[in-house]
Amino acid sequence: MEKALSGIRVLDMTHVQAGPTCSQLMAFLGADVIKLEPPTGDVTRKQLQDVPDADSLYFTMLNCNKRSITVNLKNPMGKEVFSDLLKSCDVVMENFGPGVLDRLGFGWERVHEINPRIVMASIKGFGNEGPYANFKAYENVAQAMGGSMSTTGAFDAPPMATGAQIGDSGTGVHLMAGILAALIQRERTDKGQFVECAMMDCVMNLCRVKFRDHQRIERGPLPEYSIQKFEDFAPRAGNDSGGGQLGNAVPCKPGGPNDYLYVVVQEHVWKALAKRMGGDELAEDPRFIDINVRRKNQPEMWRIIGEFASKHTKWELMEILNEIDVPCGPIMSTDDLVRDTHVALREMVVQVPHPERGEFLNVGCPIKLSDSPVEVERSPLLGEHTDDILKEVLGYENEHIQHLRESGAFAKQPPKIEKYHELRA
């Protein structure tokens, strides 16, 4: 079936999470994603294994709908294969440490020379230049340095990382936007370009409302926060909404770790909510009569809402509040989500068969296109499609493939260069 990105071929050299997130979304939307791995494979194939001798969920959940080829880029014949692949692809993606591709002889200038139309997409922790360029970055390092951790957590508690992988997966989504923009521009210019996303930069972009608040502090208090003790930076504020409307997570029965409902108290729903909780007396209480005084009396307002909530489960309370149009949502655990009918209906958790580990659950594609439906297919085994790619994409004959194999182009063993050249002569 023709899909949104049908006809786009991506050579994906990325590993771990950020790059594979990007390339998997592109594969979901129809791109032919060739995962180019070293003979040892993506490091996450063996990380956090829960089934012996099978690819880990860390790998399988980030590499669906791709094909795998193994190439030894330190081998002269492997470099030849890589060069040919560059000529046949629209996009090449990498997230190696700074300078790695240059040392292998495939920096941007060389890649652009090999294929002037190719888009080269790069993920780095801090970009390719600047004082931090050579620093190593991981998910929580990016959250720490991009402003997320300083603004997450309780006001009087240590900085906290968010469970959402905004440093890795968030950067991957940003990178896909950059790649697609470069491909659209190529339609006008017939020329590829270099696309870069730094994890720190992308976390900062996702924290933009905190930079809004940073600037507002200079002009006075931030009344939407339940705490009113500010220094010269945007504060941690627990579960305060931090927006124009007041919001917070209220505890429900039976009092488990995720028995909470997040409630947003909009100005126009307060009277209906107050009447439901305490009748006309609460609805007309001068402490809560409008949003300005409610902001000043937030702790007491949330105490009253919490007392009402404690008599209901989060699901019961959600139903009650939805009847009076109060925006709310239960704190959903991973177990809640994998069992949820709405999530299943939207195909956001799907079961995927795998030849080594059996069925596993995978998060579906969050991008829904009416004419490009997504069918999630399993991740590839290491090097599973090497011969297919060499034949279909590069047009190599069986004899040539065998020669390359004997030269060590796809394996870890030392190359037999002399024999290769004898066979090619």
Image (cartoon, helix red, strand yellow):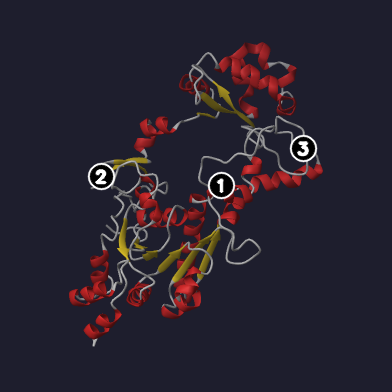
Q: Position of residue 219 (x, y in %)?
A: 81, 43
Q: Quadrant of residue 226?
A: top right
The residue mark sitting in front, 1 or 3, is: 1
Q: Position of residue 397 (x, y in %)?
A: 20, 76
Residue ranking furthest to the front: 414
Residue 386, compared with residue 348, is above or below; it is: below
Q: Helix, strand, or loop for circle 3?
A: loop
Dot 3 amino acid type? Phe
Q: Quadrant of the N terminus?
A: bottom left
Judging by the rendered image, the residue that carries numbered circle 2 is 353
**Residue 229 is at least partly visible in this image:** yes
Q: Are marks 3 and 2 in contact (CB under 8 Å)?
A: no
Residue ranking furthest to the left: 398
Judging by the rendered image, the residue that carries numbered circle 3 is 230
Residue 381, compared with residue 417, is above or below; it is: above
Q: Position of residue 236 (x, y in %)?
A: 67, 37
Dot 1 amino acid type? Asn
Task: Give the Cα distance between marks 2 and 1.
Answer: 31 Å
